[in-house]
Every structure is written in C-alpha cells, then in structure tokens.
Image: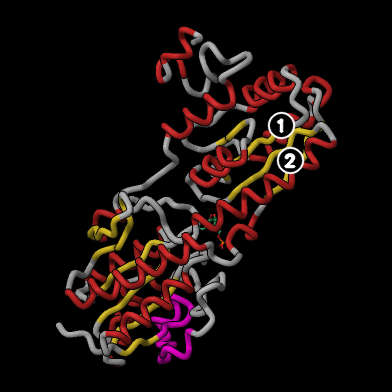
Amino acid sequence: MSMKRIAVLTSGGDAPGMNPAIRAVVRMAAANNIEVVGIERGYQGLIEADFHPLRIRDIGGILGRGGTMLQSARTEEFKTDAGRRRAIHNLNKAAIDGLIIIGGNGTHQGAHLLSQMGFPIVTIPSTIDNDLCYTDFTLGVYTTLNTVLDAIDKIRDTASSHQRAFLIETMGRNSGYLALMAGIAGGAEVILIPEAPMTPEEVLEAIQTQYALGKPHSIILVAEGYKPGTMAVYNYLHEREKEIGFTVRMTILGHIQRGGRPTAHERILATRFGVAAVEHLIAGNCGVMVGIMENKIQTTELSKVVSCHKGADLEMYKLAQMLEFGHGKFAANGHPALNLKTHWPRFATGD
Ligand code: F6P
C-alpha cells in the first residue's frame, strides 16, 4: 500500500529522545512526499481523534527538548476492544495509511493489539527503563543515566563530608537496568536490583565491610523494583547506625529522571529510529518495532517483542560486584547474593 499520509503518537511515560524521533519522522516523511498527522496524548488522543497536521515548521526547535511535544498518557480505554475499534475508525476516517507509535512496554502491548487488527504500524522503543527486548537501547536511557550519574556525584560530595551511607532510589519499574548501570558508572558501593536482591542484613554487612576498609561514605543504588524496597532497607540501617559507623540518609530521584535535554547520543539514536520507522512503513514492513542491535537498526515482529521481558544484565551485575567486593571481606567468595567463586574463578584463587 502506498503511503500518502501517516500519523505519529507518543504514549506511556515520556522519555528524552521522543521529540528528536518525532522530528525525524516528520522530516523523513516530507522527503518522501508523505503528510504527517500528529496525535495528541497517545492512545487517548487516538480514541478521541485529537489529530492535527504536523509540518516541518511545527517541529522547529524540538530536537534538543525533553518530554514530548505531542504529549503522552496512559489510557485504560485502549485496553478494551471497543477502544481499539474506535481508534481504527478514527484513523480510517482521517485517511491515515500508517501509524508510528513511540513508547515503552505497555505502549507496545497496545501497538501489537492494534496491529493485529490489520492496521500498518511501526513502533519506536522509548522508555527510560530499557526493558524492551530486541533492542540494546530504548530512547531515553542515555540521557537518564547521565541524570542519575549527576545526582550520584552530587550526593557523594555531601555523603563523604558527613561520613554517611546514602540510599539513592532510581526508577526502572521491574527492571534493575538503570540502577545497575548508573551504579557502575557512579562507582556505587552497593547496588540493589530486583534481579539479584540482597537482604537488608547483607547490605548492612557490606557497608560495615566498607566502613572497616576506611571508606568515607557508602552509596547504595536501589532500583524501585527491588524488594523489600528502599524504605525497608533505610529503616533497617537507620536503627543500626551505631553498628554501621555511618549515619544513613535516603534520596528518591523520582521524575527528575524523565526530564532533561536529550544527549547527543540520544538525539542520534532517535533520528535513526525515526527515519527507519518511516522507511519500513513505506516498504510495507509493518507490525514491527525498530531497534538497535550491534549498532545496526533492525526490526522485530511485535508479537515477539511483547512476549519477552528484559531485565538487568547479570553479567554486568557480576562485574559490579567484582568492582565493589574485589578487595576486603567478600574477596574470596563474592557477595552472598551471587556466588562469584562460581562465576569468577579468579576469586577462588585470590589472584
Ligand atoms: O516506565 C517509565 C517509568 O518512568 C518507570 O520507571 C516508573 O515506574 C513509571 O514510569 C512512573 O510512572 P508515572 O509517570 O505514572 O509516575
């Protein structure tokens, strides 16, 4: 089917990179004489036919802006058959030939269902959680990691001045990716993720070890999906401050992680994704997500994307543990949360 008019929407949690992706879609479409329609507030706007033309002049200045100029929403109505039928009706009525959907996990579930109803769809993965399979990175991750890193560096300054243990909670929903990668980049002393949870008792032990080693502070990065949760660990440590040697504080970074100017890397990735999405719609390769694997843009069927969950990479977790506990008390066996003796034979010999 030849594409004369396509639409684009952003849905779910916003992420830095959505705007540069919208810009790339509009520019690539214009280069192929295709009109673009912007849909406001994600699936909600799709159901309500909140459409408007999106021309080159409308996207001026958005390349460096965080958030999404099309706004976003999480919509219960789209989960119903009636809601999706209404969406298809509105798309057909507006003579839209294809749809580009930018969003994360929940958004992809919706995109898959819509695509199953026969509408030509290509999606762009965008979530600060980086929890979608078949892409090494989702839009937003690069920028958010830098935001978290900046917070860690600042908190370390004050933690060190006051000899404190600081819990820093990141977003990430059920994935420990953000906490793990920011923890590695920021040199955190302990990283707590849902994929390899340490108990509060083990955290206490780890901090005591670091105190005994003469560390002036302890930074504990916690993913929001970690159980029993940041507050539980805080309470446990707070009650034992004398034992630990450090006083304890906690910072929940919250939605600051979703804002900010997309980094250079983010803008480039968003541009590649946006261009590729239009290319695949034109080529009729629909019902797919564009992704990046080994620095190549690839597409994967939505049915595969939605039946897969990506958590934090446990190899990277082992690496983080080696960096944290490669000396001192846990050097021989690693931390109890992962048996480094098995995974890192060097620890067994003490080389
Ligand atoms: O999925 C992105 C995300 O920022 C998660 O990390 C977080 O759990 C959630 O969205 C927060 O959602 P809301 O915008 O509804 O507060």
Residue 184 sits in which quadrant?
Answer: top right
- Mark 1 near mark 2, Cβ–Cβ under 8 Å? no
Give the residue type that dot 1 points to: Ser
Rendered view: 180 above or below 19: above
Q: Residues within 10 Å of mark 1 (few under 14, many from 20)?
A: many
Q: Nearer the viewer, residue 30 or 286?
A: 30
- What's the distance in space between the residues labelled 1 and 2, CA to CA? 8 Å
Q: Earlier in the sequence, mark 1 or mark 2?
A: 2
Residues in magenta, as a range: 38-59
Q: Which residue is mark 1?
A: 218
Q: Residue at x 34, y 50 (%)?
A: 133
Rendered view: 159 above or below 281: above
Q: Which residue is mark 2?
A: 156
Give the residue type that dot 2 points to: Arg
Query: In x, y percent, where is residue 132?
Result: 38, 53
Whether residue 58 is in magenta: the answer is yes
Q: Secondary structure at mark 2?
A: helix
* Left or right side of 14 for 248: right
Q: Nearer the viewer, residue 172 or 54?
A: 54
Whether residue 295 is in magenta: the answer is no
Rendered view: 226 above or below 340: below
> Given this view, does label 1 or label 2 mark the residue nearer the observer?
2
In which quadrant is the N terminus drawn?
A: bottom left
